[in-house]
Image: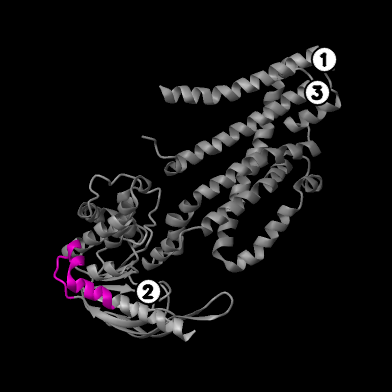
Amino acid sequence: MGASIRSLSRSAVPAATLLGAVAVWELASHVLRIPKFIMPAPSEIAAEGWEWRYRFLGHTWVTLYETLGGFALSIAVAVPLATLIVYSPWMRRAIYPLIVLLQAVPKIAVAPVLLLVIGYGEFSKVIVAFLVAFFPIVVDTATGLAATPPELLELSRSYRASAFKTFVKVRFPMALPFFFSGLKVAITLAVIGAVVGEFIGSDKGLGYVILSATSYWKTGLAFASMILLSVIAIVLFGAVCLVERLVCPWLAPAAEE
Amino acid sequence: MIRLQGVEKTYRTRRGDLVHAVEGITLDIAENEFVTLVGPSGCGKSTLLKLVAGLTPVSAGTIRVRDTVVREPFPDVGIVFQHPVLLPWRTVLDNVLFAAEMLGLARDDHRKRALELLELSGLAGFETRLPRELSGGMQQRVAICRALLPDPSLLLMDEPFGALDAMTREELGLELLRIWDARRKTILFVTHSIPEAILLADKVVVMTPRPGRVARVISIELPRPRTVELEFDAKFKAYSDEVRGLIFASRRARADGR
């Protein structure tokens, strides 16, 4: 009973704050007569968004799969790379500085060149999303793989278990919490990557909608797209958290008694 | 069963300095003997254990286990560390069976034995719990069961009760003796607690640091089964004075040398 009231108030307080802020915004834009193209009222944003609901479907889908494509690609590249870095000192010396160097290059600056080379299709956005998302996965997975307690590795050696067996049964599962914290950062970055790609050149996706809406002074539509993008980012982040909880149930906080 | 002859281990630190971890260790350990290695930190006790396990090669000298020279890890050994290092996603039972899996043995053949061991260590009813649901002492019992699962004839224990509180430590020590009584094996047990070393052992090996050397091997002639009350025995006190004397003599000698 007490717990349910506590959890209710925990979600009620921020919800009320948000609603209050929206109400103040709505009121202010009417009282101060702020022009619609500068700062539309929440009601106007909602109305414009609703008008676009069917067209939004297609654009949302495009951004979503560019994001997920880039995210999937970054996992596929980052995990083997992290494994190589941890297992081979030679590879670590060869690859690690390169990865850091790549990370230091502002991807947003690279994107126009990339689009020029790869083309303006959706694949180029997948690549931009991949480029911004893969770094945290490599670093966190490598950190996790390197963090295996040395005693466990000695134990595996005393059993004369193969390196592969040790990886599958000990090292990788042990690194999963790190891997997932990398994924959580990566998924939100992937959304940004996809949108940046769309900004530079595309005729589909929410990034494209924002860009074209602002050039026609349709600020309400741009706001609606931004909100949609945020919702996508939050939902994807939540999905990663959910998968983490399903894959690593032992990480959940112990039940209070 | 184990014979160490002139064993020496040196390694280089990252800065390139040569460190003599242990030097001139000659030691004989009989079958089913309970031997404790005691000494201050830095005396190479843990290094010696790793050498016997074949986890790290000797720099000089030889180690023989049953007349075979140890050059690499061999399966007939169980290892227990200071920390239980259980796999947090596995249940207690699966953590014990981990040993069988890694050795490439069939899980099903060892299930019964794993359950028996858990029962023997007072963990019956906890088989399906996760490690984090257990206290430190219970986790360490699971680690001991894991080490005992393949029924090794040699058990190497590196300060296994060092991270536990004093009461749990005493309790687990006596429990280990009870298990050892039921399933005899040779145990090499590293500790820096003098009473623990005496209470458990047939033979206490006192080591002095930098480089780690054997100061004296003391045969403990106290009746078994051992109890905590023995610690008040005059003989027990004499043993512990002897050990303490050896350790502090080496400290004084080093202090004077500087």
Chain ID at mark 2:
B
Q: Which residue is mark 2?
A: B45
Question: At 65% from the left edge and 62% from the top edge, which residue is drawn?
Answer: A95
Horizontal relation, residue A151 to residue A239: left or right: left
* Magenta region, residue range: B221-242
Badge 3, how many Cα within 10 Å: few under 14, some, many 20+? many
Q: CA distance from mark 2 to mark 1?
A: 79 Å
Amino acid, disc 2: Lys
Q: Which residue is mark 3?
A: A219
Amino acid, disc 3: Thr
Label 3's element? helix
Chain ID at mark 3:
A
| Residue B226 in picture, x, y percent from top left | 17, 65
Q: CA distance from mark 3 to mark 2?
A: 73 Å
Q: Using the image, determine if residue A243 lies above or below residue B161.
A: above
Q: Using the image, determine if residue B85 lies above or below residue A91.
A: above
Amino acid, disc 1: Leu
Label 1's element? loop
Chain ID at mark 1:
A
Q: Are marks 2 and 1 on the same chain?
A: no
| Residue B134 in picture, x, y percent from top left | 33, 47
